[in-house]
Amino acid sequence: MATISYVEGQIKRLEGFAVRIRFAGPGGAKGRDVRGDKAQIAGYPYRRKRPDEHSVADWVSGRFRTTYPGFQVDVLDTDGNTVHGRKKLGNLRSEYGS
């Protein structure tokens, strides 16, 4: 099992963009960032990045939500701002220089 920080790093290395993992709820923690040292989460299981023509929303629903139920994710631009779901992964990766 991995930590949240490790999984966020795995996603950045493979997919080419940064993410912030948050609690999905219910309860008072809903929407809050998950501490980076929180353990007992599975590592990111994918070996190939999602194709560039897919959107951020496609990545979230097709990869993140299916792998990490109970968590939400913010996909971040290079300034640390949340990216809109319609943005293409290829455009986002080009901002990161990937």
Image: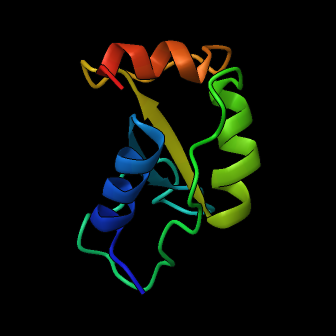
Quadrant of the rendering where the N terminus is positioned = bottom left
From the viewer's perspective, is residue 53 above or below residue 46? above
Residue lying at 44% horizontally and 49% vertically, measured from the top left: 14
- Camera-side residue of 26 and 70: 70
Q: Is 66 displayed left or right of 40 in the figure?
A: right
Residue 20 seen anywhere in this rendered image of the structure: yes
Q: Which corner quadrant of the image does residue 57 belong to?
A: top right
Tell me residue 77's x, y (percent): 36, 21
Residue 35 seen anywhere in this rendered image of the structure: no
Q: Is 50 displayed left or right of 34 in the figure?
A: right
From the viewer's perspective, is residue 71 above or below residue 20? below
- Camera-side residue of 83 and 9: 9
Quadrant of the rendering where the C terminus is positioned = top left
Tell me residue 83's x, y (percent): 49, 20
Q: Which corner quadrant of the image does residue 96 belong to?
A: top left
The structure's colour scheme is rainbow
Tell me residue 37's x, y (percent): 23, 73
Tell me residue 23's x, y (percent): 50, 58
Q: Which corner quadrant of the image does residue 84 belong to?
A: top right
Residue lying at 36% horizontally and 52% vertically, measured from the top left: 33
Residue lying at 31% horizontally and 76% vertically, measured from the top left: 38
Residue lying at 35% horizontally and 48% vertically, measured from the top left: 13
Give the number of callouts. Answer: 0
